[in-house]
Image (tube, rainbow, N blue to C red):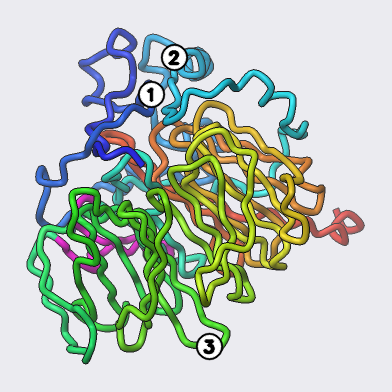
C-alpha cells in the first residue's frame, strides 16, 4: 500500500460555495494520498452539549421525508443543485491506482445489475460523532455490535455511539499514554502513546486496533484501560493495515494482523502471545477468515489474492482476475463465496470450490472498493467506495439487484448490525462528517389484506 497518509480532505469546488454560509467543506475531488492530522484535536472529542446541538446536527427519517437532505447539506443555499454537483463529482473524481494496467475490457466483464431497489431505508444521521481517517486506503474504522451500538474512530478517540440514547462517549483516548492493565507471560506487551489508529475490529466484547507505526492495541469493552498494547513491527514500512478477530477450530479467540512489512501475525486473544506468523512477497493489506475458520484470505500489493490454510499459512489457491491492489474482503456466511475489493473499482466474487476464475464482477461508480460486509444471514452484501457510494446487493437475486446509497464525503467504514436490522456508514468530512444509519425494510404481505 502507499506510504503517504491521508491528508485534510479538500472537497467541494471553491467557486461553488457561498462562503458566507458555510465553513470549509471537504467533499474531495480525488483519492490521492493525503493525511488527516489528528494533532489538531489530541484530547477527547466528546462534548457534553449534545441536546443543544442535536437539532442542528441531526437528521431524522421524518425530516428526510419532508425534504431535508439526509446529511443536512443546505442545497437551497448553494449556487448549484445536488444533481448538478453529483454530475460534476462523477466527472472530476480521480480514482487512485497503484498499477497502470489497461481497463478497457473491464466494463464488459462486469455483471449487469438492476439498480433502484431499496433494501435499507434511511433512519438517522448524526454529526455529534464524526469518523476520521488516518490512511486514504484503509477504511475499516467503524463497527456495529448491535442495532443500537457503534464504535468508530474520531481523531485520537475511540467513540461509542448509542442510537437509543442519541449520545456518544469516548471509550479510549490513544493520544494519552497507554499502559496495559495486565501482564501476560511470553507476550511483548509495552506502553504506547499518541497512536494513530489505522484500522480496527470489534467482536464479542473485544476491540482490536492497529496503528500507523505498526502498533496493536486490544481492549475489553467492559473493562477500563487496555489489556494489551505493543509494536508488532518497527520498520519504516510498519503500518498495521488490518486486524481481524476470529476463532480457531478449537474455539479459542485470536487476533490476526496484516502489516506493510509483508507479515501476517496470529495472536492468542487470551494470553496475547504471537502464536504464528506468515511471510508473503508483498505488503499485506487485508485478511479475513472463512466462517469455518479453516481458510484465510490474504490480499495486498498484488493483483492476485491468496487463499491459505488458516492453521499453517500454506497457500492453497491463487485468485487471479483483479487488475490492481486489493484492500477488502468478506466471506458469505455459508463459507462458499469470498468477495474481494480492489482499486480497479470492482468487487469479485469467488466460489472457493472452483477458484480458476471469479463467478461475478461487480462494479462501483467512481472509485476503488475499500470495504465489503455481508449481513449475518447472508441475504445482503454491502460494498463501499472511497467516497460517495455504498452499494447493497441482494444475494438471493444472484447479486443481480442493488440499492445504491448516494452521499457526499469520504467513507471511513460500513457495518451491518449483527441482527441485520441496521447498516451504519461513517462519513469523514470536516463539515459534514457524520454517522448514517439505515434500517432494514420488512415486507409484511399479510397487511395487504388489512389495508
Q: Tell me, yes or no, if residue 124 can be seen here.
A: no
Residue identified by numbered label 1: 30
Q: Which mark is residue 92?
A: 2
Q: Determine contact: label 3, label 2, CB under 8 Å.
A: no
Residue at left offset 20%, top offset 16% = 20
Establish if 141 lies above or below 102.
Answer: below
Magenta stretch holds residue 47: no
Looking at the rendered structure, the secondary structure element under dot 3 is loop
Crowd rating for badge 3 (residues with CA inside 10 Å; few <14, some 14–19, many 20+): few
Q: Earlier in the sequence, mark 3 or mark 2?
A: 2
Q: How far apart, in angstroms, are the residues tagged by discs 3 and 2?
A: 49 Å
Q: How far apart, in angstroms, are the residues tagged by discs 1 and 3?
A: 43 Å
Q: How far apart, in angstroms, are the residues tagged by discs 1 and 2?
A: 8 Å
Q: Tell me, yes or no, if residue 210 can be seen here.
A: yes
Residue at left offset 43%, top offset 11% = 80
Residue at left offset 55%, top offset 60% = 297
Crowd rating for badge 1 (residues with CA inside 10 Å; few <14, some 14–19, many 20+): many
Q: Determine contact: label 1, label 2, CB under 8 Å.
A: yes
Q: Which mark is residue 10?
A: none
Residue 177 horizontal/vertical position (percent)? 7, 68
Most foreground residue, 122 or 252:
252
Q: Quick one: quadrant of the N terminus? A: top left
Crowd rating for badge 2 (residues with CA inside 10 Å; few <14, some 14–19, many 20+): few
Q: Quadrant of residue 270?
A: bottom left
Residue 376 horizontal/vertical position (percent)? 63, 66
Residue at left offset 80%, top offset 48% = 398
Most foreground residue, 335 or 400:
335
Q: Earlier in the sequence, mark 1 or mark 3?
A: 1
Mark in the foreground, 1 or 3:
3
Residue identified by numbered label 3: 251
Image: magenta residue range: 155-174
Residue 366 horizontal/vertical position (percent)? 52, 26
Amino acid at each position: 500500500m502507499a506510504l503517504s497518509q491521508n491528508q485534510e480532505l479538500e472537497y467541494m469546488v471553491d467557486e461553488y460555495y457561498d462562503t458566507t454560509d458555510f465553513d470549509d467543506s471537504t467533499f474531495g475531488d480525488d483519492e490521492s494520498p493525503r493525511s488527516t492530522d489528528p494533532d489538531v484535536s489530541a484530547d477527547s472529542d466528546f462534548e457534553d452539549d449534545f441536546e443543544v446541538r442535536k437539532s442542528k446536527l441531526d437528521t431524522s427519517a421524518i425530516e428526510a421525508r419532508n425534504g431535508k437532505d439526509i446529511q443536512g447539506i443546505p442545497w437551497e443555499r448553494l449556487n448549484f443543485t445536488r444533481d448538478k454537483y453529483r454530475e460534476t463529482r462523477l466527472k472530476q473524481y480521480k480514482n487512485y491506482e497503484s498499477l497502470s494496467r489497461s481497463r478497457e475490457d473491464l466494463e464488459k466483464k462486469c455483471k449487469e445489475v438492476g439498480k433502484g431497489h431499496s433494501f435499507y431505508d434511511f433512519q438517522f444521521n448524526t454529526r455529534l460523532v464524526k469518523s476520521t481517517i488516518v490512511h486514504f486506503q484503509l477504511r475499516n474504522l467503524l463497527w456495529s455490535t448491535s442495532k443500537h451500538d457503534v464504535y468508530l474512530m474520531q481523531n485520537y478517540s475511540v467513540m461509542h455511539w448509542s442510537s437509543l440514547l442519541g449520545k456518544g462517549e469516548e471509550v479510549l483516548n490513544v493520544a494519552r499514554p497507554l499502559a496495559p492493565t495486565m501482564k501476560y507471560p511470553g507476550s511483548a506487551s509495552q506502553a504506547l502513546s499518541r497512536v494513530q489508529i489505522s484500522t480496527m475490529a470489534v467482536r464479542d466484547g473485544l476491540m482490536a486496533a492497529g496503528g500507523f507505526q505498526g502498533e496493536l492495541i486490544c481492549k475489553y469493552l467492559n473493562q477500563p484501560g487496555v489489556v494489551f498494547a505493543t509494536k508488532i513491527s518497527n520498520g519504516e514500512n510498519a503500518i498495521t493495515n488490518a486486524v481481524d478477530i476470529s476463532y480457531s477450530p478449537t474455539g479459542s479467540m485470536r487476533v490476526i494482523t496484516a502489516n506493510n512489512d509483508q507479515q501476517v501475525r496470529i495472536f492468542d486473544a487470551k494470553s496475547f502471545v504471537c502464536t504464528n506468523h506468515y511471510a508473503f512477497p508483498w505488503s499485506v493489506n487485508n485478511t479475513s477468515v472463512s466462517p469455518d475458520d479453516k481458510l484465510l484470505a490474504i490480499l495486498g500489493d498484488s493483483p492476485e489474492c491468496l487463499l491459505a490454510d488458516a492453521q499453517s499459512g500454506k497457500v492453497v489457491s491463487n485468485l487471479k482476475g483483479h487488475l490492481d491492489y486489493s484492500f477488502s474482503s468478506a466471506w458469505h456466511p455459508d463459507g462458499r463465496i469470498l468477495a474481494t475489493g480492489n482499486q480497479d473499482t470492482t468487487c469479485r466474487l469467488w466460489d472457493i470450490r472452483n477458484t480458476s476464475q471469479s463467478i461475478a464482477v461487480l462494479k462501483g461508480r467512481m472509485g476503488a472498493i475499500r470495504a465489503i460486509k455481508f449481513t449475518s444471514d447472508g441475504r445482503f452484501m454491502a460494498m463501499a467506495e472511497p467516497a460517495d457510494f455504498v452499494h447493497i446487493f441482494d444475494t438471493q437475486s444472484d447479486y443481480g439487484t442493488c440499492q445504491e446509497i448516494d452521499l457526499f464525503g469520504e467513507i471511513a467504514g460500513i457495518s451491518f448490525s449483527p441482527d441485520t436490522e441496521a447498516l451504519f456508514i461513517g462519513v469523514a468530512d470536516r463539515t459534514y462528517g457524520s454517522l448514517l444509519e439505515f434500517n432494514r425494510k420488512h415486507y409484511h404481505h399479510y397487511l395487504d389484506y388489512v389495508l
